[in-house]
Image (spheres, helix red, strand yellow):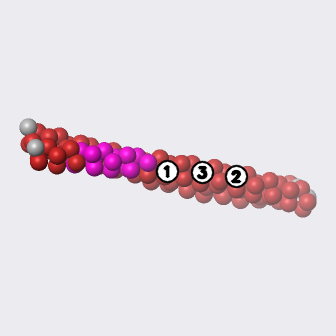
């Protein structure tokens, strides 16, 4: 029975570690996607700037440039907020998994004493 509890604990720990690894991988992928989106936004901004330079007066161009910079900043802020939320979620999940592991280890130690 103690061996079964130990095996169950080991399996649970492996499972929790796999879940943590999947969460970390998902967070890394999300960070890469947000970074790529930000780079694409920069490229789009540059392309629009070139097009408007040819088509608009200097004052109109400056207005559009300010608008695009604001939009780029808003997108960057959204990406940062999304990454912060993903990070908080991952941290909470890791804390929860660690608490579960601690409870399982405590239960196993108590079982071993009995």
The quadrant of the rendering that contains the C terminus is top left
Is label 1 or label 2 in front? Answer: 1
Q: Residue at x 11, y 48 (%)?
A: 113
Q: Residue at x 60, y 57 (%)?
A: 39
Asked if residue 37 can be seen in this view, the reply is no
Name the residue carrying label 2: 74
Judging depth in this view, the residue of 25 and 12 nearest the camera is 12
Judging depth in this view, the residue of 88 and 50 nearest the camera is 88
Please indicate whether residue 52 sits to the left or right of residue 111 in the image. Answer: right
Name the residue carrying label 3: 81
Residue 34 colored in magenta in the image: no
Q: Residue at x 89, y 56 (%)?
A: 60
Q: In the structure shown, which secondary structural element does the residue marked by tag 1 occupy?
A: helix
Q: Which residue is the extreme one toward the front?
A: 114
Name the residue carrying label 1: 88
Label 1: how many Cα within 10 Å (few below 14, some 14–19, many 20+): few
Please indicate whether residue 13 sits to the left or right of residue 49 in the image. Answer: left
Going from the N terminus, do you reach mark 1 or mark 3 first? 3
Q: What is the chief secondary structure element of the magenta stretch?
A: helix
Image position, residue 11 (x, y; %): 20, 43
Judging depth in this view, the residue of 36 and 34 nearest the camera is 34
Please indicate whether residue 11 sits to the left or right of residue 81 in the image. Answer: left
Asked if residue 70 can be seen in this view, the reply is yes
Is label 1 or label 3 in front? Answer: 1
Please indicate whether residue 37 sits to the left or right of residue 19 in the image. Answer: right
Is label 3 or label 2 in front? Answer: 3
The quadrant of the rendering that contains the N terminus is top left
Q: Is residue 61 above or below residue 78?
A: below
Asked if disc 3 and disc 2 are in contact, CB closer than 8 Å, the reply is no
């Amino acid at each position: 029975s103690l061996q079964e509890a130990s095996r169950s604990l080991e399996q649970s720990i492996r499972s929790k570690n796999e879940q943590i690894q999947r969460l970390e991988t998902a967070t890394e992928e999300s960070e890469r996607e947000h970074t790529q989106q930000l780079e694409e936004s920069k490229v789009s901004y540059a392309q629009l700037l070139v097009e408007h330079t040819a088509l608009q007066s200097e004052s109109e161009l400056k207005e559009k440039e300010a608008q695009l910079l604001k939009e780029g900043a808003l997108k960057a802020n959204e990406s940062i907020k999304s990454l912060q939320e993903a990070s908080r979620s991952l941290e909470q999940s890791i804390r929860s998994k660690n608490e579960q592991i601690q409870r399982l280890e405590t239960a196993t130690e108590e079982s071993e004493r009995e």
